[in-house]
Image (cartoon, coloured by chain):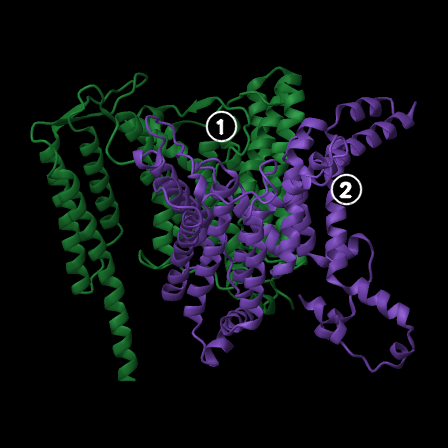
Chain colours: A green, B purple
Amino acid sequence: MSVITAQQNVTVIRTSFRAPIIYAVIALAVLLGLALPISAHASTTFTFARPTDLVTVPSWTAPSRTLAIVLSLVALALAAASAWAAATTRKLGAWVPIVFGVAVVAVLLTWAGAGKTATSMQITGLLTAALVASIPLVFGALSGTICERSGIINIAIEGQLLGGAFLAAVVAGAVANSTGSRSLGAYLGLVAAPVAGALIGAVLSLFAVRYWVDQIIVGVVLNVLVVGLTNFLFGTLLKDKTYLNQAIGLPELPIPILGEIPIIGPVLFRQNALVYLMYVVVIVLQVMLFRSRWGLRVRAVGEHPRAADTVGIKVNRTRVRNTILGGAIAGLGGAFFTVAAGLAFGKEMSAGKGFIALAAMILGRWSPKGALAAAVLFGFADALREQFGIVGTAIPSQFLAMFPYIATIFAVAGLVGHSRPPAAEGKPYAK
Amino acid sequence: MSTETSTEVTTDDSVQQEQSVVSAVLRSIIDSSWLVVLIAIVASLLLGGVLVVLANDSVAEAFGYFFSRPSDTFHAIGQVLGDTYAAMFKGAIYNTDAHTFGDAIKPITQSATMATPLIFAGLGLGVGFRAGLFNIGAQGQIIIGATVGAFVGFTWDLPVGLHLVLAVLGTVLGGALWGFIPGVLKAATGAHEVIVTIMLNYVALNLVSFLLSKDAFQVEGSDNPLAPAVGANAMYPKLLGNGYALHWGFVVALLAAVAVWWLMERSTWGLQFRAVGANARAARTAGMSVGMSYVLVLVIAGALAGLAGSAQVLGTQPALSSNVAASFGFDAITVALLGRSRPLGIVLAALLFGALKASGPALQVQAHLPIDVVLVVQSLIVLFIAAPPLVRALVRLPKPRQVKEVTA
C-alpha cells in the first residue's frame, strides 16, 4: 500500500510543477528576448477609441522599455507564485494563467509598437479582429465537442464549414435575386447554412454508425468530397448564374446601451446576428451538456456505451442525432465566411479553419466553455499576426500562424495540462 | 480485409458439397473484395456523370420541354456523358486525335507521372495503416522532404549521379524527420498521431513559406516566394526522352513498392509492425517494443512520403514553392485505402487516381468541366469501398458467406 501512495504523490508533484516551469521559461524569454533589448528612448502608443464611439477613451503613450520590463516582472512574479503554490500543494485558481497571458501579450504589443511614431497599437481593432477570426473556430469546435462527446469523431468539420459557406451564399443570392431584399437573403442564407452541415453530418453518421467505417477515414474523405463538389459547382453553376454568388452581408445589429460601453461595446455588442447566435449556442450547450438529462446521456454514450445501453439509452440513435446536430452547428459557422463576412463564395475558402477548430476542441478539453476559450485564443493569435503585419515586426508572420498548431501538439502530448478524449470515441457500438 | 479469407472457409453442409464447380467459382467472385472495388469504381464514375449532366446547360434546356419531346433530353444527356467520358479517356490513356503514335500515348505516360508521388506516399500511408497508425501527415512530410531535397538540388553543384542520390536522400531525410516527430510523441506520451500529423501539416506549410521568404531559398535578385530551379544533375532523368514528362522516379516508385512488400511480408520488422497493428497489447506481451514500432513505422512512412516530394521537385515541378505537395498527401490517403494498404493494390490505385488526375486538363479543355469533378469521383470511390455492405446493397449482391459465419 505504501508503495502505491508514494507513486501517487510523485505523479501529483510532477504534474503540478510543470506549469510553473513553463511560466518561468516564457516570462524569462519575454524579459530577456523582448523587453530588455528595446531602446530606452522608445515609446509605444495604444489606441482604444474608434471614430464611431460615443464615449471615447483617450490614447495612452508609455515608455516602451519600462512598461515591458514591468509587465515581464509581473509574469515572472506569477511564475514564482505558481511555484510556491505547487510546493505547498495549494490551488491558485484560473486567474493566474489569464493574468499571465495578458501580461505576456502586453509585452509583445509594447515591443511591437516600440519606437513606431507613425502607427499605434489599435487595441479595440485587435480585439474585434480576434473575435471575428474566432467565429468559425468556435462553431467548429462546438461541433466537434458535441460529436465526440457522443463517441463519433468528426474530422469533417472543415467540409461542414465549407458546405455551410457555400449553401449560405447560394441561398442568399437566390433569395436576394428573386425578392430584391438583400438582408432577407442574408438571413435565409444563415438559415440554410446549418442544413448543409447537417447533411454532411448525416452522411458521416450513416457510414460511422450503420456501416462501421472508420470515422477518421469518412471524415477525411467527406472533406475531399465537399471540396470537389463546391469547386465543381463554383466552376459551373455559379459561373453561369452569377446572381447566385454575390457579396451579401448580414447587417450589423448594435445592441443599444451595451454597445456604447468603451472597448467592450464595439468588440462584443456591435456585431451581426451570427455573433449573437454564437453567444447563445455556447451558453446553451455548456449548460445542456453538463446540467441536463440530455447531456448526461450524451456523455454516457461517449464514455461507456454498454453501460448507457443497459440503462435503456439508445446509443446509436443518440450518436446519429448528435452527429447531425454537430454538423448543423459547424454548417452555421460556415455562414461566417460568406454572409457574415459579406463576401461571395470562393473556392476552398474555409482554408483549414476546420482543423484549427478541431485543435480548439482538444485544447478546450471537449467542453463548450473550453472550446470558446481556445478558439478565442487562436483567433487572437490570428488577429495579432495581422496587426504585426501592419505595424511590421521582427517576428515572421508564419511563426504566429503556426501558434495554434504547435499549441495543440503540446496539448495532446500532455506537456500543457492533460487532455483526455471521451473513452468510447471512434468505436462503433454493437449490441 | 475479412473477405480475403473466403477461400479458407469450409462448411460441412452437405448441400454445399453438391454445388457445381461453376457456381462455387461464381460464388467466390461475388464474395471477393475485388468485385466490390470494381463496382465502387463504376458506380462512382456514373455518379460523377450524373453530376456533370445536372450541371449541364443543354440538358437543362432540353428538359424544359421534356414532355413534348423527351428524346431531346436523352440525346443531350448522351452527348454530355459521351463528351465527358471520351475526354477522360483521351486525357488519361490514349489520345485518339493525335497524329503520331508518340503523341497518342502521351496521356498514359502523363498518368504514370501523376501516379508516381501517389505510389510513394500511398505506400508510406499503407505501412502506417497496417501497423494501426493513421498518418494524416503525408502532406507535411512531402513538403518537408521536398524542401530539403530541393535545397540540396539548387544549393550545391555536384557531378552527375552523386547529386541526384544526395538530393533524393535529402527528401528521404526530410520526410523521415517529419514522421519521427509524431512517432516519438506517440511512443513517449501517447499523443494521438491523427491530431499531431494534421497539425504538423500546417506547421510544415508555414515553415516552407517562411523559408521561401528568406534569401537562401529565393532566386537571386527576386523577392518572389519561389526557389531557384533544381540543378540539372539532381533531376531524375526522363524515362522516355525529353518529349515526355515521365521520369525515372516512376521506376524508383515501383522498386519502393517491391521493397515495402518485402519489408511487410518477409522481414522481422514487418512482422512486428503487423503484429502491433493487429493487437498492440498482444504484441507487447510477446516481447515486442510497441513504442519503437510506432517510431519506426512513422519514420518509414515519412521517408516514403518524402520520396513523393522527390517526384515533385526532382521530377515534374520546375522549382520548390509552398504548393509543392499540391493535394498529393490527401489523395495518397484515398490511394492507400483503395489499395487496401498492400503494395500491389496501392500501385494499381495510384495508377487509377493518377489517370483521373491526368484527365483533368482534357476535361477542362474538351468537355469544359472543372477539374474538380475528379475529386468528387475519387472521394466517392473511397466512400463506397470503405463500406462494402453499401456497395452490395446498391447492386443487390448477396451477402458474403463468411460474414455470417464469423459473427455467428
Front-most of A412 and A370? A412
Front-most of B375 and A301? B375
Q: Residue furthest left?
A: A40
Q: Position of residue B398 (x, y in %)?
A: 82, 62
Residue at image mark 1: A340
Q: Give the amino acid type for the residue marked by disc 2 in the picture.
A: Leu
Above-or-below relation of A291 to A258: below
Q: Nearer the viewer, mark 2 or mark 1?
A: 2
Q: Provide the secondary structure element on which disc 2 rests.
A: helix
Q: Position of residue A164 (x, y in %)?
A: 57, 35
Q: Position of residue B182 (x, y in %)?
A: 41, 57
Q: Provide the secondary structure element on which disc 1 rests.
A: helix
Q: Residues within 10 Å of mark 2 (few under 14, many from 20)?
A: some
In the shown orientation, is residue B353 left or right of residue B75? Answer: left
Say which residue appears at 57% left-offset and 58% top-offset: B255
Front-most of B70 and B180? B180
The C terminus of chain B lies in quadrant: bottom right
Q: Residue furthest front?
A: B159
In the shown orientation, is residue A366 left or right of residue A196? Answer: left
> Same chain for marks 2 and 1?
no
Per the rendering, the mark at residue B298 is none
Residue at image mark 2: B46
